[in-house]
Structures are given as structure tokens and as C-alpha cells.
Amino acid sequence: MIALRKMAPPEILATKGPEWTAEYLAAKTAGEPVSDTVRFRYRHAAVKATLHEETHSKCAYCETRVSVGETDHILPVKERPELICVWENLALCCKECNRAKGPYYSASEPLINPFVDDPDRHLLFFGPLVLHRSGDDKGMRTTVRLELSRPDLIERRSRRINDLMPLVDRWKVHEEGETKKLLWQLILKEAADDSEYAATVRAYLFSEFGVRVPSEPDNRAAA
């Protein structure tokens, strides 16, 4: 999980979101069955496309690359129905994280929201594992609830590290010069926000070089 920034909402949601929300709430209040058309308007193609863009087509929680992905309500509609079409409450995620997260909701004990919180303040990355920082309840809730160290993720992150090792080893032994500089740029690219499992890669590179690659964001308030 890495820190993310919310883009501007797609025009369709900015213009139609309040209307869609009002219609959904009216149907719920009336006790009527809510049609799929009314219930799932937040899945509009333009909304999904912008979600993909802002997360680099990765799950906002585990950073797995997704071709389609699912549209998650950060705060569940069951508890916060007024947020069904609110842009700040929508995120792209994989089906596994969506399933694990389920209807979790607590106003006083939330999970990490990567659009608001800096995950690095709450989580530690050791090789392919994701752990919470000692004494950090928000990190603990998030790692446990989202199963961020589930077996399939450990396997994928391990492959990611193994694939990167030859590039790092080559940089270490190469003589100074333009080739070594280019190798370093390739390493930096592997740690960029749009790379799969970027948080894991950054932690691995820190263990190899003792420096943050790239620099940690410094403008997120501690939650």
C-alpha cells in the first residue's frame, strides 16, 4: 500500500452524483427494492476509468495490478448510504481485498485510507510481508482485515523482489559511468508509484542501499 492522491471526479459523477444519491436514498427510505440501475450507478465506465488512472490500475490496498478491478466504497454503503456516489469514498481494488474488507466500518477505529493517510506511518514491509508498526492499531486493523500478508500476495511480492535482484546486483558491481547511471534510473523506475508492489520494492531497495527510493511523501498528516 502506498499513499495515493485523489484526482478530480469525472464529469459524470460531479454532475449526476447528487441526483443519483438522492434517488438511491429515496428508494431506501421508501422501503422499495432498489434496482441494479439505481444501486450501481457509481460503476459508470467514466468513473471506473478515472479510478484506474489515479491508482495506476492497481488495487488501492494491496497494489496488485488489475485489468478490470472492483469499485470499492471506502466507507461501506450499508453504514453510510449517503456516500454511495461520493467520489472521495470510491477506490479501485482487487476482488480479494474487497472480499476481505467486506462491510467493515467504525467511525472511531477506521482502516488505513491511502488517499488520506500515509501508509508508511502505519505499516512495515519486510521482504514480501506487510506488518503493522508496533503499537499501531490502525495498521494492525488494516493488515488483519485486508489480509495483506495472505499467501498469494507473499508469493507475488517474492517474485517481484527476485525479478529485481539481478538489476540491483548488476548496478552494484558495475564501474562508475553512464551505464551505471542508466541502471540506477531503471532501479528508480521499478520503485515508482505505477509499479506493482511499489511499497515492497522500496523497502527492499532501502535494505540494499540504506536510502529511501524514492523519497517518502512528507505532506501527509499522521492519523
Image (spheres, rainbow, N blue to C red):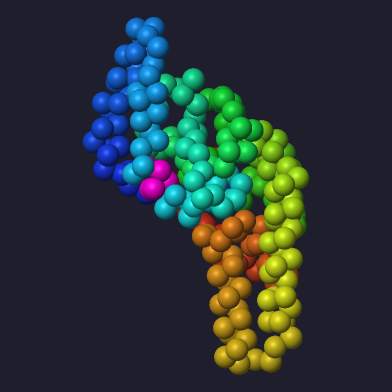
Viewer-side residue, 207 vs 24: 24
Residue 34 coordinates in the image, percent (x, y): 39, 16
Side (left or right) of 24 relative to 73: left
Residue plotted at (70% across, 56% down): 157
Residue plotted at (58% across, 85% down): 181
Q: In the rendered view, would you say 59 is above or below 87?
A: below
Residue 39 coordinates in the image, percent (x, y): 39, 24
Q: In the rendered view, would you say 178 is above or below 101?
A: below
Asked if one can make out residue 42 in the rendered structure from this viewpoint, the answer is yes
What span is colored magenta in the figure?
47-51
Residue 148 coordinates in the image, percent (x, y): 68, 43
Tell me which corner region of the image, top left, top right, bottom left or bottom right, holds residue 90: top left
Side (left or right) of 74 relative to 84: right
Asked if one can make out residue 207 in the rendered structure from this viewpoint, the answer is no
- Is 158 magenta? The answer is no
Viewer-side residue, 143 vs 159: 159
Q: In the rendered view, would you say 165 is above or below 12?
A: below
Residue 71 coordinates in the image, percent (x, y): 47, 37
Q: In the rendered view, would you say 47 is above or below 201?
A: above
Residue plotted at (57% across, 71% down): 188
Viewer-side residue, 203 vs 84: 84
- Is 49 magenta? The answer is yes
Residue plotted at (37% across, 9% down): 32
Q: Residue furthest top?
A: 31
Count the marks.
0
Quarter containing the C terminus: top right
Q: Which SS does the magenta portion mostly show?
A: helix
